[in-house]
Structure formats: C-alpha cells, structure tokens
Image (cartoon, helix red, strand yellow):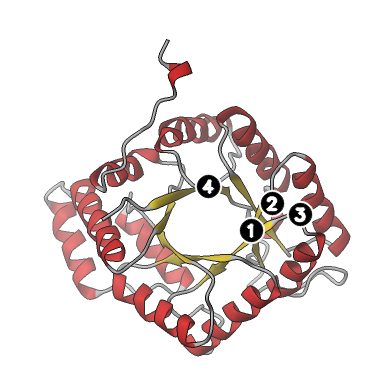
C-alpha cells in the first residue's frame, strides 16, 4: 500500500523561545516533503502579523507549499481581503478559510459589523478573486455549536459549494469517527477530499482538555490506557503506538492524506511518520 501524502500544521511564535521552537520544527519536518504546511491564526486575529511573517518565511526559506489560515474575526471585509491580497502578492496561493474562535474573554463568535458573517461568506469572497486554492475545516464529530452531525455535514457542503476544494478535520481518537463522517459526506454529495487531522499526543492532560473544548469524544479505554502508561513512564511510547495505529487504520480504509497538528513539537510527529514508512529526503545541494 503506497505511503500517504502528509501535511503539517504550525503556529506562529509569540516569544523568542517559541520562535526557536518553530524553526526547529520546520527544519526537522521539512525533509519529509509534506504536500503542504499550514500556519494558524490566533484567536481573535491576535497573531495576524506573526502568521503573515511565518507563512512568507517558511515559503521563502524552505520551499514548502504554505497554506495561510485566515479568519473572519475582528476585522472588516476590506481588511480581511487586504490580508489575502498580501498573501497573493507574496506568492502564497493556498488559504485555510475559517470562521475563527471568539476573541479572548468572549464566549461566542460575533461578526464584525462590516466583516464576514461566516466562513461561507469568506470562502465566497476568496473564490471570487480566483487567486487561491481554498481549504476549510470540518468536524467528524459534532461541532460544539452544531445541533447534530447532519448539521455538520450540511455546513461543510455549503463551504465546498462556496468554493473550497478540500477540508481538514478536527482531530479524533478512533478511525471509525472519521469513516462515519466521510460516509455521511459522500451520501450528502460532497466529493471534495476530506483530510483527517491527526493530533500526536505529546501530553495526555493537554490533549484531553483540547478535546473537551472542541467536542472530540474521549473513549473510556483511552483514559484508562494513558493513566496506566503515565504511571509506568511509557506515555511517549503509547502516544507513538496509538497515533501510528490510527494512521494505519485510516490508510487501510482508503485515506491517502494525513494532516498532523504538530503543536510546534516535531519529534513525535517525525517518529510517527517514520513508523509509517516515510523517510526524510535530502536534496543533493545539501549533501556537499
């Protein structure tokens, strides 16, 4: 069975230490030749300039295909489209278009009076420019604000119909969660690629908190397994084995692309890719 295409998500640094960690992450993972990498946008647009800087630097210095996250939060339509245009001028042709999280201190998203009301509106405007390949987010389990899974699927279809060409899912812990969602999307007439998002579990307590915030189901067996592994000092070994098994199950089920949420901590992601048979590729000019 052929190796999957892979992609990685990074986030822009807000401190000097975080900056070193980002560039270490990019240097370590770039030789795996990802199909693309994405750079996130902070809640409330708080990392707008940092995201732009990281996107352009990664593209210029590492030759990677970079997809810039862009959200609707706390900006007018004109401001948001100006950011998109600045990406186009910098040679960035991929955007991950998202509604975005509410600014810190606010419980829910509220559209800017002169801004985009939803991700669908943003996607339509980006598509009209004809300058971008547009990726979007998807929830294989119910979005915290969605009524049910059917609403999730219907909303994704609206985003694809608005001009998106593929979707990247929120992370999940069991392959069946993704397969159920993929089947429901196919039944709804969605034929765009849906790329499963994989979260290497660097810290179980952190991953669990993240899961609770975004509506990801935490199976009972996983709690018990990690509790035992933490007691035995085998958390890292377990995380590697579980993520590799999840990826393998997805590949066996026909998945051709995997998107890793690296959290700017590259070692576990690299180990998982290695276990899947993906090896670094060193270009000849770097071997002299």
Q: Residues within 10 Å of mark 1 (few under 14, many from 20)?
A: some
Residue 275 shown left or right of residue 111 in the figure: left
Q: Are marks 1 and 4 in contact (CB under 8 Å)?
A: no
Q: Residue furthest top?
A: 288
Name the element at disc 1.
helix
Which mark is in front, 1 or 3? 3
Q: In the rendered image, which residue does mark 2 sit on?
A: 46
Pointer 1: what residue? 43
On the picture, is 187 further left or further right than 86? left
Looking at the rendered image, the quarter that the N terminus falls into is bottom left
**Residue 206, numbered circle:** none
Q: Position of residue 169 (x, y in %)?
A: 47, 67
Callout 4–callout 3 Cβ contact below 8 Å: no
Mark 2 residue element: loop
Please report the residue visible at 79 percent of the width from the left and 67 percent of the height from the top: 125
**Residue 224 x, y percent position in the rendering:** 17, 67
Q: Nearer the viewer, residue 223 or 72?
A: 72
Q: Is residue 61 above or below residue 264?
A: above
| Residue at the outermost left position | 232
Marks 1/3: CA distance? 25 Å
C-alpha separation, residue under disc 1 versus residue under disc 2? 6 Å
State the separation of the CA atoms marked 4 and 3.
Answer: 17 Å
Q: Quadrant of the C terminus?
A: top left
- In the image shown, does 119 or 14 lie closer to the viewer? 119
Label 3 crowd bin: few (<14), some (14–19), many (20+), radius 10 Å: some
Label 4 or label 3, whichever comes before in sequence order? 4
Q: Which residue is mark 3?
A: 131
Sequence-wise first label, 3 or 2? 2
Residue displayed at 84% across by 52% down: 82
């Amino acid at each position: 069975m052929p190796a999957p295409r892979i992609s990685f998500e990074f986030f822009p640094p807000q401190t000097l230490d975080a900056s070193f960690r980002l560039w270490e992450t990019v240097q370590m993972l770039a030789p795996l030749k990802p199909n693309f990498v994405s750079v996130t946008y902070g809640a409330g647009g708080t990392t707008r300039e940092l995201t732009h800087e990281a996107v352009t630097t990664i593209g210029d210095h590492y030759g990677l295909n970079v997809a810039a996250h862009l959200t609707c939060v706390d900006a007018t339509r004109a401001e948001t489209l100006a950011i998109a245009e600045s990406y186009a001028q910098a040679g960035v042709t991929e955007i991950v278009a998202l509604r975005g999280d509410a600014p810190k201190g606010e419980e829910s998203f509220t559209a800017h009076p002169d801004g985009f009301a939803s991700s669908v509106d943003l996607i339509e405007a980006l598509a009209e420019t004809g300058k971008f390949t547009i990726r979007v987010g998807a929830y294989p389990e119910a979005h915290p604000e969605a009524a049910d899974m059917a609403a999730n699927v219907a909303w994704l279809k609206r985003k694809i119909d608005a001009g998106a060409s593929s979707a990247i899912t929120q992370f999940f812990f069991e392959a069946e969660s993704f397969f159920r969602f993929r089947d429901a999307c196919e039944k709804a007439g969605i034929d765009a690629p849906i790329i499963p998002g994989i979260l290497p579990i660097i810290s179980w307590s952190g991953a669990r908190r993240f899961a609770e915030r975004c509506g990801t189901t935490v199976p009972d067996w996983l709690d018990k397994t990690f509790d035992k592994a933490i007691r035995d000092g085998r958390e890292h070994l377990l995380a590697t084995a579980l993520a590799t098994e999840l990826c393998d199950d997805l590949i066996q089920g026909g998945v051709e692309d995997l998107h890793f949420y690296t959290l700017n901590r590259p070692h576990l992601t690299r180990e998982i890719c290695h276990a899947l048979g993906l090896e670094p590729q060193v270009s000849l000019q770097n071997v002299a």
